[in-house]
Image (spheres, rainbow, N blue to C red):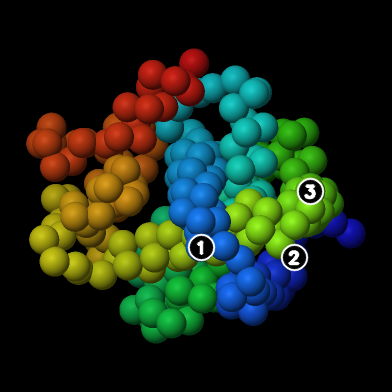
């Protein structure tokens, strides 16, 4: 009943955007930096460190406390559960830039890939066994099974006022969504001063100018060359410094 079905997630994201613009004129300008900052934090903790580097690629080990933090933060990204994300992301790596790649902008067009990449359930090819490790984890199952209950409870807490709802749910969710989709889609497009350091048989690029935003996850070509390695600085050059790896090694990894 509370599981994150793809069509439901998409409808919720559309609703979030509609509500954002609808109540834009009634919220204080001061709430925007708060909401964007919180969305940026949730994106990195929930999406980049948690769902991507930890749950998908097991680049490091950590304790149960951080696993719960990752699951909860990713839930607030409004991108579905970590179990669903893991299956989709494994499909992306297996079929990168091919017809069955759910993120591929070259096959599907950037607009469709940007707005619908995580919800094309008719294109899922990998069977459930691709995420069998997550299915065995009781915490992962809990956050998947009660996804909308957890998210709905958090939203209810932010509904104390329009300002709180906008600053602590709506703006963070939209910020995290667009950071995620930009990273997913444009990591396979050549941008100014981007490059490919490794032969990966796909169009993944390292976008060095985006480091202040993505903190190491802009090294997408490096990631496709060594997806299970935590430190994505494969060359030792300063421009490939991986801030997320530095943070994880010092504060999160066990």
Which residue in the structure is indicated by mark 3?
Answer: 157
Which sits in the foreground, 37 or 211? 37
Q: Quadrant of residue 215?
A: top left
Which residue in the structure is indicated by mark 1?
Answer: 29
Residue 175 picture location, percent across and down: 50, 60
- Packing grade of label 2 (10 A; few <14, some 14-19, many >=20) is some
The reply to whether the C-beta atoms of the residues labelled 2 and 3 are less than 8 Å apart is no
Residue 158 picture location, percent across and down: 74, 52
Residue 5 circle label: 2
Mark closer to the chain start, 3 or 1? 1
Residue 189 circle label: none
Q: Secondary structure at mark 3?
A: helix
The reply to whether the C-beta atoms of the residues labelled 3 and 1 are less than 8 Å apart is no
Measured along the vertical axis of the image, is residue 232 above or below residue 120? Answer: above
Residue 99 picture location, percent across and down: 43, 76
Mark closer to the chain start, 2 or 3? 2
């Amino acid at each position: 009943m509370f599981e994150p079905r793809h069509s439901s997630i998409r409808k919720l994201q559309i609703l979030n955007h509609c509500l954002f613009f609808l109540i834009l004129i009634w919220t204080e300008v001061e709430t925007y930096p708060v909401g964007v900052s919180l969305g940026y934090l949730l994106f990195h903790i929930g999406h980049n460190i948690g769902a991507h580097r930890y749950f998908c690629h097991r680049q490091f080990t950590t304790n149960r406390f951080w696993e719960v933090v990752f699951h909860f933060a990713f839930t607030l990204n409004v991108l579905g559960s970590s179990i669903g994300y893991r299956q989709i992301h494994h499909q992306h790596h297996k079929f990168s830039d091919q017809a069955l790649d759910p993120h591929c902008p070259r096959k599907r067009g950037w607009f469709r890939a940007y707005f619908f990449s995580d919800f094309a359930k008719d294109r899922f090819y990998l069977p459930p066994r691709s995420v069998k490790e997550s299915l065995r984890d009781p915490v992962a199952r809990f956050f998947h099974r009660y996804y909308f209950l957890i998210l709905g409870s958090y939203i209810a807490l932010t509904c104390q006022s329009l300002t709180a709802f906008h600053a602590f749910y709506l703006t963070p969710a939209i910020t995290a969504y667009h950071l995620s989709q930009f990273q997913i889609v444009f990591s396979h497009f050549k941008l100014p001063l981007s490059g490919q350091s490794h032969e990966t048989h796909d169009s993944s690029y390292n976008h060095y100018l985006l480091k202040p935003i993505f903190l190491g996850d802009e090294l997408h070509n490096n990631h496709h060359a060594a997806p299970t390695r935590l430190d994505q600085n494969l060359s030792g050059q300063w421009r490939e410094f991986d801030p997320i790896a530095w943070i994880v090694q010092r504060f999160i990894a066990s």
